[in-house]
Amino acid sequence: MERPDVLVVGGGSAGLSVSHELGRHGVEHLVLERGRIGQGWRDRWDSFCLVTPNWSVRLPGGEYAGPDPDGYMSRDTIAQFLDDYAGAFGPPIREGVEVETIVRTADGFTAHTSGGDVVAREVVLATGAFQRAHRPAAAASLPANVLQIDIDGYRNPAALPPGAVLVVGSGQSGAQLAEELREAGRRVVLSCGRAPWVPRRVGGRDIVWWLLESGFFDAPASTLPSPLARLVSNPLSTGHGGGHDLNLRLLRASGVELVGRFMGATGHAAEFAQDLGASVAWGDDRYREIMALASRTALRLGMPAIEAPEPPPFDPTAPEHVDLRGFGAVVFTGGFRPNFTSWLPWPDAFDDMGFPLQVDGASTVIDGLSFVGTHFLRKRKSSILAGVGEDASVVAASIARRLGAG
């Protein structure tokens, strides 16, 4: 039975960052990963790429230093980047070991894993922001002869049955899939909700530069209008083709059919709310807010003024019903939810949506339990490659202090 001081669950960007920082403090630890290093990235669809530019990858001791800082790493390139990152400092990681559950003991924790039990004084859960795909309850009303998959089951257009595709959810993933499917010649109906959108570049710089420089990504959850706002999509954009704008107006212009929120189906008729115009207007308001933030940032830094044109008019007309005969698949892309309570015996350690109750990554309910990589753990950037390393450093330093390490 292995007995490290700290067990880190997850060998992706969060877990590796924690390992790097624990090692820097001289803390004995073990990292367990259910698959390969970066498995969560390897599981994404074939054409997946980052929405944030490569220069914004800021892992501890592993900032991007490659030949394409303004590009957007593909799925396989991200996995290779993490392999190389791990190779550079040699984390004590065991791949292909799944942690089935963790229980409290008198002197810490015991993790029951597919490779045997592990006993540790502290545990860090770094299992990623994308844990459980969300599918609305109305999905159960869809006709059984139409394939239904979540975003984590999608690979490429050719892997879907022939026919039109209904994409439910217009956040970053849904918008990107709608664009890809339409470019592949499919008829695409996109069921839209509320999502902010931004231009890819503003004032000659990537929008992510402005979001970081302005402090947008540093906002803590306490600044949100409600806890539910943690589930709002990141601003719509894409890194495909070197990066370009992506929003509902552009998708409609490309031939994607926009409808409102999916309400359910009766027989072969899918029903949608008449709220498309309201969703677009909400996204336009977020665009204005972000452009105003960029303008204030430019003024503060003495840069040229930012031009922020008004969004063009939008026709909110959309069908209330769509006949699903001739559709080959429905893809649900309505985001992800935390999944800790499905395998951990501490329901009181999480809020009603499954997010951990914590301060600076440390559980306020279970002593010795910490988290890295979840949405809004400390800031808006906590789950992206520009911010996960910062949280890992904070969590590792706290653990080192508690254990009396250097």
Image (tube, helix red, strand yellow):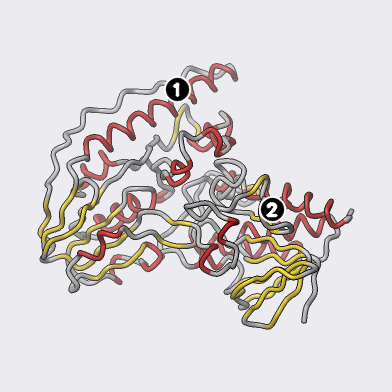
Q: Residue tagged by mark 1?
A: 292
Badge 1 amino acid:
Ala
For residue 74, the mark is none
The residue depicted at 36 percent of the width and 48 percent of the height is: 171
Amino acid type for the residue under numbered disc 2: Gly
Element assignment for label 1 = helix
Q: Residue at x 51, y 67 (%)?
A: 342
User: Circle 2: is it few (<14), some (14-19), or many (20+) Cα within 10 Å?
Assistant: some
Please name whichever residue, 131 or 170, is drawn nearer the observer in this view of the structure. Answer: 131
Q: Is residue 64 visible?
A: no
Q: Quadrant of the N terminus?
A: bottom right
Q: Nearer the viewer, residue 198 or 196?
A: 196
Q: Is residue 165 left or right of residue 32?
A: left
How many marks can you see?
2
Residue nearest the viewer, comparing 255 with 2: 2
Mark 1 or mark 2, which has the lower sequence index? Answer: 2
Left or right: where 262 falls relative to 14: left
Q: Is residue 216 above or below residue 396?
A: above
Q: Horizontal and vertical percent for residue 300?
A: 58, 18
| Residue 62's disc number | 2
Nearest to the eye among marks 1 and 2: give it.
Answer: 1
The answer for how far apart the CA atoms under marks 1 and 2 are is 33 Å
Density class for disc 1 (Cα within 10 Å; few <14, some 14-19, many ≥20) is some
- Residue 365, placed above or below residue 221: below
Q: Is residue 175 above or below residue 283?
A: below
**Residue 371 seen in the figure:** yes
Between 107 and 330, which is closer to the camera in this rendering? 107
